[in-house]
Amino acid sequence: MTEIFGVPTQALFGQLLLGLINGSFYALLSLGLAVIFGMLNIINFTHGAQYMMGAFGAYLVGQYFGIGYWPSLIVAPLLVGLTGVIIERTMLKRLYHLDHLYGLLFTFGVALIIQGYFRYYYGSSGLPYPIPPSLAGGTRLTLFDQPIMFLPWYRAWVIFFSLAICITTWYLIERTSLGAKLRAATENPTIVRTFGVNVPLLITLTYGAGVGLAGLAGVLAAPIYQVSPLMGADLINVVFAVVVIGGMGSILGSVVTGFVLGLIEGLTKVFYPEASTTVVFVIMAIVLLVRPAGLFGKAATTTTGVESTSVGSGLDGGRVLNVVMAAMAVVLMAAPFVVYPQFLMKALCIAMFALSVNLLLGYAGLLSFGHAMFLGSAGYVSAHAAKVWGLTPELAILAGTATAAAMGVVVGAIAIRRQGIYFAMTTLAFAQMVYFLALQVPFTHGEDGIQAVPRGKMFGFIDLNNQLSMYYVVLAIFMFALLMVHRIIHSPFGEVLKSIRENEARAISLGYKTDRYKLMAFVLSTTICGLGGATKAIVFQLASLTDVTSGTSGEAVLMTLVGGLGTLLGPIVGAFVITGMETYLAEWGQWVTVIQGVVFVVCVMAFRRGLVGEIAYRTGKPL
Amino acid sequence: MYNKPTWVSVMAEIRTSATPGAPLLSVKNLQSWYGESHILHGVNLEVRQGEVVTLLGRNGAGKTTTLKSIMGVVRKRQGSITKGGTETIGLPSERIAKLGIALCPEERAIFSSLTVRENLMLPPKLRDGGMSVDEIFSLFPNLKERIGTSQGTKLSGGEQQMLAIGRILRTGADLLLLDEPTEGLAPVIIQQIGHTIRKLKERGLTILLVEQNFRFASTVADRFYVMDHGVIVDGFKAADLEANMPKLHEYLGV
């Protein structure tokens, strides 16, 4: 048998083929994302779900109407595209005049609804979809009479067809008059409309087409991977990294990066299999360091300004807030005698998490979509410190918090170089990297997590195994975090942050080094987040993978949104509402995800002030 | 000093002074808003078939907003705007374009992600009379030489302005709204643009022009309107320009 670099040729080429197949899907999906981003300026978080819908579409039309693979290749993307058109026309369209981050949150909510719904009906296990008979079998490739590899026809078809679609789409956008209209509308939709071009229709069709591409990728994937509700969620996280590497909105960038990264992944599987799932994210980190705009991206800066409730200020309002905070502390002190303390402690830890997200989003206008990486990492470190190193709980929590702060310095320094959606994508991609690391490094124990963490004795004399003692320690930590956030946002530093949120260019022109302020805010936020995560690990005696998933990051944003962006107390209320929903609706299973998605969508569409924000707005008092 | 005219007297004067012929564009009591701020407070004006009419006024008087409101770019508007008898208030820009109105915006809006050719070819032919590329080249010979340029924004200011005017001729609009086409351009280029506007007039196009430079405007316009604080405060024929100079100086503060 022939070998290259000590690897059998067959294995090498087999992995390369697999890499190309994965690359085809990366390219197709990031292409759809780029098309949508270019026109709508929205990162379509529903993309993974729509890819899954494409696969299910093919499966279902086959089951119910006996429609085979080839017609499905047209029918299913059209159906998926049609759902996209409906979503755009009825809802997404109403968000264009707002900050683009709302579009991102909206599509995230829709993804939750779709994925939850499909999981409820079809479970998590995969459904088989046969390879079309005309493409069954394959051929043995040889080079100089040496066998290289076995090439299944269907896989060859996937690579060929994806390439063809990518090239066609690129040509359509870069070289035709329709493409010129699209590009012009991206730059200045108002003027293009005065030329008699129906830009809103163009936007709708673009979204439909981008979503249709996701559906098409889904049909192509159906015979290779199994048809399952989570097939998109797993893939899309890598695709987001591809998009960040390629440069957001670049058609050529997404295609080239997609295929190349697929190949690199394949090669990594041959030579260093342990790193194959993280290699994409490592490349991403390097690219972001060298070229923050991505390999093919233009260095565009977008100003951002999230709608926030900055109403009334001054002593009177401040007094109301102090009274409310004091009342809340009293209620929380009495609460464990009425409500299950375990629930309260969870809500308080999660509330610190939400507070940290809101500190960035509500006051600095930075949407971190990867904050779970700080929550989870702090949890792992504090659990490990308490269990393996035998540290006392206060030191374990401190170690976890310090870890989150240190990570905040690194991630923040890279992420704050971009604004708005780019910032959100960068943080998300880093969180994915951390997720895959947590899955693989030994000390986190993969899927099991770190279990049976001892609670120990705080300062040597407070026995945390007593539920009430534990609760009051958590409450004290929480109040400390709350007062810290309160102090931050009402300090001159907080005022500068708000000015950066409103108008960064002006803040710079006034002489503020806004990057330094943003980094500082980022690190403060990750520190508070880490405090919550570290405490949570001690309370629940467990550090698990759930706490580093992108879903958890999304939840924190949801809590902030439900409670009220840019309000001090909003995230806390949001945390109690969402944690309460999860705890008390647990027996509803997948419907909880669907309900969360609906809450997301409703908040973004109609209730952007949130619960506390609404009260603050009506009473004119900052809360 | 003169007596500040009411809009009733202004309209009466315009009605008597304007050349006979059907009004192609008629704006009555137009009010417009940018978000919460009320910009136009009841603009009344008429442009007749084949006329070149110039809107004069200080910065912030509402000239550009008037053009944008006619084009539907400013969405929040009340009153009445008719083009050839068709009411356009409330219509989106793309529908207004199909009625034969085209806007050349002040900032020219040349697309940097499009080549010069793509920029020129961008507006589709919407009505009869839409010019072919050759016709546009005959009006703007410079553009022909630069058509191969890879990026629209690589052209000089004057070339960009010509491209911006040239491309809207493709739609076949018979009413052109030109917003300060001479702004920031060299005198020799301004002359060329004046020449082009006269040629367009000869072809029977109707033009509503916004200008700060009334010396230039007087070389092309048939009539003038003067705007201040979101209303039309005066109007006169080109022939009466000299007689109106003292008033104009006061309006424009020049």
Image (spheres, helix red, strand yellow):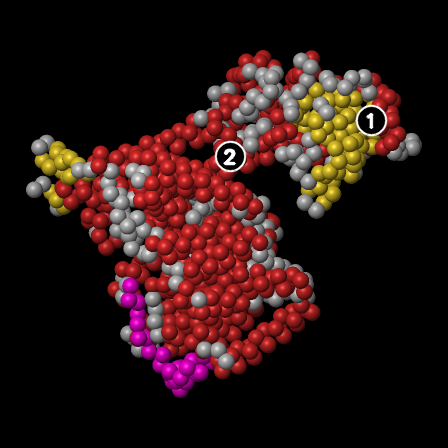
Residue B26 lies in magenta, yes or no?
Answer: no
Quarter-of-image position of residue B99: top right
Residue A514 pos. (x, y %): 54, 54
**Residue beneath the point at 42% across and 80% down:** A470
- Residue span colored magenta: A447-474
Instruction: Give a yes or no on whether discs 1 and 2 share a subunit.
Output: no
Taking depth in this image into account, of B195 and A191 the one nearest to the observer is A191
- Local packing at callout 1 (Cα closer than 10 Å; few below 14, some 14-19, many 20+) is many
Give the alpha-carbon distance from disc 1 to disc 2, as whole Å: 42 Å
**Residue beneath the point at 31% across and 44% down:** A63
**Residue beneath the point at 24% across and 38% down:** A132
Mark 1 vs mark 2, foreground winner is: 2
Residue A133 pos. (x, y %): 22, 37
Residue on which the image places disc 2: A202
Residue on which the image places disc 1: B235
Residue A623 pos. (x, y %): 61, 66
* Left or right: A429, with B83 as reference point: left
**Residue beneath the point at 55% across and 34% down:** A199
Report whether residue B137 is seen.
no
Dot 2 amino acid type: Leu
- Extreme-front residue of the structure: A65
Q: Is residue B21 above or below residue A539?
A: above
* Left or right: A441, with B199 as reference point: left
Q: Is residue A67 above or below residue B105?
A: below
